[in-house]
Image (spheres, helix red, strand yellow):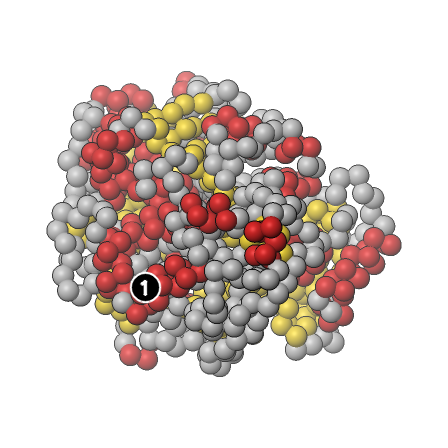
Amino acid sequence: MSPTAKSMASSDHLRHVESMATLPSGAGRIPRLNAVILGDSLASEEDDLVYPSEGFSEQALVSSPEQYLKMYKRSIEDPAGFWSEIASEFFWKTKWGEEVVTENLDVRKGTIKIEWFKGATTNICYNALDRNIEAGNGGKVAIYWEGNEPGHDGQLTYSELLEKVCQLSNYLKDIGIKKGDAVVIYLPMLMELPIAMLACARIGAVHSVVFAGFSAESLAQRIIDCRPKAVLTCNAVLRGTKAIHLKDIVDDALVESAKNGFSVGVCLTYENPLAMKREMTKWQDGRDIWWQDVVPTYSTTCEVEWVDAEDPLFLLYTSGSTGKPKGVLHTTGGYMIYTAMTFKYAFDYKPSDVYWCTADCGWITGHSYVTYGPLLNGATVVVFEGVPNYPDSGRCWDIVDKFKVTIFYTAPTLVRSLMRDGDENVTRYSRKSLRILGSVGEPINPSAWRWFFNVVGDSRCPISDTWWQTETGGFLITPLPGAWPQKPGSATFPFFGVQPVIVDEKGNEIAGECSGYLCIKKSWPGAFRTLYGDHERYETTYFKPFAGYYFSGDGCSRDKDGYHWLTGRVDDVINVSGHRIGTAEVESALVSHPQCAEAAVVGVEHEVKGQGIYAFVTLVDGVPYSQELRKSLVQAVRNQIGAFAAPDKIHWAPGLPKTRSGKIMRRILRKIASKQLDELGDTSTLADPSVVDQLIALSDC
């Protein structure tokens, strides 16, 4: 450790903060702890903090807590001025008036309403493409595309991307799609997916991307709800060695939709010849159109439809507790500046960066941080069609080296999966280009954080562990890589303009070190405005549980230093004998065991405790099941959390039921744990449905 770094970690623990008492959480000064400096040495279990190096901070967009605090304070005290200044960096056909934001987040005071920049007109596609080209970046690569098979790739510059977007925009207009009309997009991660999103945005149409892994029934639900003028799809896609016939799924969904009284007039289908030849594709004349036959014939220029800042941009359906998907509606202006700014600062974006987010555009992460956020900043984005472990577990790092990726953003599920496959699958690749790592989707347990930091990032890349939701549009709590020390597993502090509070069951704000329900007071520009066609459900779900606040549905702890630790969904909180235990907390303790590769915890009924803890555990390859190991895993939880959190049951799991995007389907695990095997429901979106049968077979082992 250099003398300078040593003094940072010991004599002046927070070298650039006189006091953290002014942080939004009310945190006091951080006490002296064991620490490691970025790039200096590995982070171990004993290290509480990981510091940015002096060199990293000097180059960072936000280089110190003082700078963060100054910007944060202004964003809270003068949100209209703060966000107007940010918005002025973008193109607006007409500017906003004096009233930048109008909001009511309190159901007791009337209808919930959030509006930013209302009356101003703009276009997000124009800002993502035309504005960058006019700035002289038309020749810069906008998208590097990597196919399912290694070596099958492509790229588009900003100018080329705009031409393809305009051609599709002109086609959509020609078939009668106008401003405000819905278009459903059911495509894999081809370049045509972001092209389709941008083309809809260019003409003011509202896109609804459905993850190309959902079943026909799920797709039909969404089609029936938003009533699109067209569906855009692909005949088939390869995921690893498995072919998925997407057009067949769309056909079945359109039949189901017609039975429910709604028919779609056009199904534009992209031929993906590596997965399926067009002559093998089922076809309905008059409705089905080959993309390659019509779209390239249209002009490569298309006039922009200027839309109000509060006009809808997209609908994205997310799971609801009632089973009916919720159509989360995001509007244009506020979402545009919020995704752009969160991308820029959370990843410390520089124009020379090559950015790769492994998410699919079927999820909010793919909207905000594959398509809109990066392109609004003029970034070069990697779009990957395949799966991370095909043809082997080194695929991610092969792609990183190939495109010289500098920012790598992924999910904890993938991190844990790659951990399980062994360090050598990482270390045989250079990864020297990497500068920033990111985590999204669920809390990342500290042991996975450290592996990601030490092995993938060679202990020199800070990790932006982002907390946000489909509903929030962009990051709400996230590290700013050069500004402050990180704690493995903590999302740290709020982003500009975001006021998180932790409340108790009665809705009272709790100060200082605490645990409770995570709420947000005051709106932020990227917030969703309603649930499509059901504003009452919007209010009931998000604003009635704690009047005056947006309720995130997540549990959160704040430590003595003011750092936020997400504990998972509140409906993933188990109440054991009066103790509220976050499933993420128990999972983290289990995964810290050296022989545990992954764990998923659910609650089950318990006649004494009310609820018991039921843990599905996947072991490191080659480790045999044994009663001794079961006891050792339980002891690990007892040691880390306490006896009250000890699992009542350890269920051996060769694998966990996951969607193709890597999300664990806990609904299925709850049914298996409760032995409600006749109520497992739809398993068609699982990457490997056979896992369910394996878990059932091991129920009594």
Dot 1: few (<14), some (14–19), or many (≥20) neighbours within 10 Å? many
Q: Position of residue 208 (x, y in %)?
A: 34, 45
Residue at the (52%, 64%) spot, across then down? 564
Amino acid type for the residue under numbered disc 1: Ser
Residue at the (65%, 50%) spot, across then down? 43
For this view, does 595 lie left or right of residue 517?
right
For this view, does 458 lie left or right of residue 211?
right
Query: Outermost residue toward the front?
Result: 3
Residue 103 sits above or below residue 465 on the image: below
Q: Position of residue 602 (x, y in %)?
A: 65, 60
Quadrant of residue 254 within the rendered picture: top left
Question: Would you name the residue on which mark 1 appears?
Answer: 75
Residue 183 sits above or below residue 554 on the image: above
Element carrying mark 1: helix
Quadrant of residue 289 within the rendered picture: top left
Which residue is nearer to you in this view: 343 or 352? Answer: 352
